[in-house]
Image (cartoon, grey):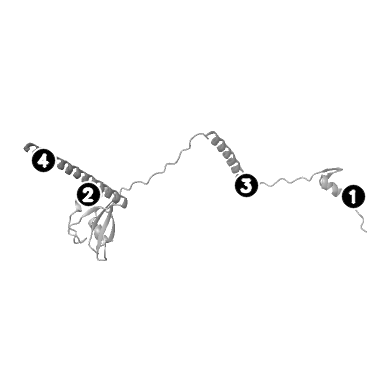
Amino acid sequence: MVKRDLEKERQLELAAIWGSEADGELRYPKRRRPAAKRPAAAAGADAVDEVLSSFGSDAVSEGGSDRGAPRKKKEKKGKKASSAYRLHCFVASGTERNAVRTVFDAYEPKVELRVSQKGNLLNKTHYAVLTFRNKAMALHAVKTLDGTDQRDLLGVREMKLGLMLSRKEHNASRRNMRNRLREERERRMVEETEEEAGFIKNFVKMYARTG
């Protein structure tokens, strides 16, 4: 049977309760080694967190003080109106885009060839859409080239340049035209009514005198 070392057991119990360092009968807790310095990145992160937390608290306090102030709403900016101006001119079948560019070389428009089909396959209209940088260039092109003979390049004896409207502009133009026609029709009806009234009045006067 192994003999127990009571003194050793007593020392272990005291070390567990009071610590492992002894000075005679006095015992002290085991001294802790100085903690290793944390990396600079961790310290920097803590500093940033502190700054952000303090900034956040300030922001909340400022927000609370300005709670009654109206907030500015961001105004939605509308689309900038395009300054491009589009014209169209009829061309012969098989006309190349470079030929159209040669005719309008001085104005450098964007050229697009299109074909519109009406009815059967043989009834096709070929035309070029010209997009100028501004209205002044388009009007100058009309003044200079409208009605000129371009048979060699475009296959037309007398070129006709017309305004190329978008769908919205086309609808507005048709609406204005309908309004003008209606006003003209109403004006004619008023004139005819006045003429009939004047004729009847003169007719009655004439027969009243003879009677």
Label 1, residues with CA under 10 Å away: few <14, some 14-19, many ≥20: few
Q: Quadrant of residue 187?
A: top left
Residue 190, percent from left and from top: 19, 42
> Which mark, by number, is residue 140?
2
- Residue type beneath disc 3: Ala
At label 4, counting other C-alpha atoms closer than 10 Å, the crowd grade (few under 14, some 14-19, many 20 or more) is few
Label located before the other in sequence (1 or 2): 1
Q: Which mark is residue 42?
A: 3
- Extreme residue in the bottom direction: 121
Distance from Cα at disc 3 to Cα at disc 2: 71 Å
From the image, state whether disc 1 or disc 4 is nearer to you. Answer: 4
Mark earlier in primary sequence (4, 2): 2
Front position in the image: 9 or 136: 136
Spatial CA distance of label 4 from label 2 is 58 Å
Label 2, secondary structure: give it.
Answer: helix
Q: Which residue is mark 1?
A: 7
Q: In the drawing, does residue 208 fall left or right of residue 191?
A: left
Q: Which label was assigned to residue 203? A: 4
| Closer to us: 178 or 53 | 178
Residue 67's place in the image compared with 134, above or below, is: above
Spatial separation of the CA atoms under disc 1 and disc 3: 47 Å
